[in-house]
Image (cartoon, rainbow, N blue to C red):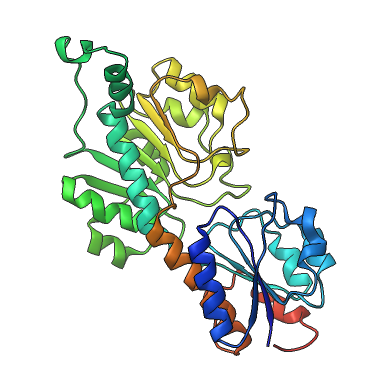
Amino acid sequence: MSRVAIIGKQQPLIIRERIKAYLEAEGHEADILYMPTRNASEWIDELRGYNAIISAGEKFPGIVFESLKGDLKLLSRYGVGTDEIDKVTAANCGVAVCNAAGSLSTAVAECAMGIILSLLRSIPTSDSEVRAGDWSRFFESKTGTQLEGKTVGIIGFGDISRALAKMLTGFDCRVIAYDIYWDEETAKRLGVTYADIPTIQKEADIISIHVPSTPQTDGMINKEFLSGMKKTAILVNTARGRLVVPEDLAWALNNGVIAGAGMDVFSPEPPLSDNPLLTAKNTVLLPHTGACTIESHEKAGMMAARNVADFFAGRTVKTILNPDYKNHTEVDI
C-alpha cells in the first residue's frame, strides 16, 4: 500500500474527494492536503512520507525531490503542463513524473474559440457599453468580423489544436498549422494543411498558440513576429504566458500593428499591476481558466488517480515524461 497526497486547492473539492475514494478502493492510503501557496518548496515537511503526490499545477523545483528522495516515487500531474516541475532532478531522485495528457483538450479549445469570437465581434466591449448606457455602437453601425471563411493559423498541433481545428470546420475556415512533429494523417482527417511559421504569420487572420514553454519558444511572439502579421489579424494565447513578450504585444495592439489579442495566460501569474497588456487596446484577458470546466476537472483528476494506481500496480503509465527515472530507482516499484 502506498501513501498518496492530493494537493491543489483550486480544483473542486468534490473531484478531490472522488480521487481519494478511488485510490482507497484501489488499496492506497490517500489524504487531501490544503496548501496555502503554489510553491511546493514551502511545505516540504507536510509532504514527507508520501509515496505519490497528485499535483494540480504547483511548482516543484528540484529541492522538493531532493528533500523527499527515498519515499516519493511518483508525481502525477492533475492536468497537462509540467514546465514548472524540475523533471530532470525528479528523475535523478528516482521520481517518475506523469500527466493527464488529453484530458483538457476540449475545454481549452472551447476557450480559444470563445476568445476568437469575442474579439471578432467585440463582445466584452459591447457588453460594457450597454451596461454604461452607451448604445452608440448600434447607431454608428460599428461592425464586427465574421469567423466564417477566415484563415486560422495554429502553432503547435497537439491534442488541443486538433480539438480546435475540428471546431473550426463548422465555420468553413481554412486551417493551417505548424508542428515540429507533424502528423499528416491526423491533419488530413481534420482538413488541416501544413504551413511553416512565416506562412502562418503572413496569411492567417487568426493565430492561436498551442506550444509548450521551452527555451526555444519563450518570447517567440515579439515585435518581429507581430510586425509580420496582418493588421486585421488577432492573436490568441491559451498555452503559456512566457511565449509572448507583453511589452511587444501591447505595442502592437496600441499602434494598430494587429487588430486584437486574447490571453488566458501570463508570466508571472497573476500578472503584475504594471503589465502593459492590462491597459492595451482590443484585448480579452482571462485568469488562466481555459481548462476550468467540471468535465475537464473530472477527466483530469481521474486520469491522474488512475496513473497512480497503475504505477504502483506495475502497469504501464503512458504519460511518464521522464523515463530516465528508472535508472535512478533504488528499489523497484
- Relative to 147, does residue 80 appear above or below in the rendering? below
Tell me where residue 248 appears, x and y as whole percent: 53, 25
Q: From the viewer's perspective, is 125 left or right of 58?
A: left
The answer to which of 6 and 328 lies nearer the viewer is: 6
The answer to whether residue 127 is left or right of residue 235 is left
Is 108 situated left or right of 11 in this image? left
Quadrant for residue 313, please give it: bottom right
Task: From this view, report whether residue 228 is shown above or below residue 297.
Answer: above
Q: Residue at x 39, y 17 (%)?
A: 256
The correct choice, above or below, for 298 with respect to 246 in the image is: below
- Quarter of the view holding residue 118: top left
Residue drawn at x 71%, y 58% as measured from the top left: 60
Residue 113 lies, in percent from the top left, at: 31, 44
Whether residue 79 appears in this view of the structure is no
Figure check: 145 above or below 200: above
Viewer-proximal residue among 152 and 333 = 333
Residue 204 drawn at (x, y percent): 31, 37
Q: Quadrant of the N terminus?
A: bottom right
Q: Residue at x 49, y 26 (%)?
A: 249
Q: Count the marks: how many?
A: 0
Residue at x-position 36% and y-position 44%: 112
Residue 71 coordinates in the image, percent (x, y): 79, 77
Q: Is residue 326 visible?
A: yes
Q: Quadrant of the C terminus?
A: bottom right
Left or right: where does residue 201 sit relative to residue 92?
A: left
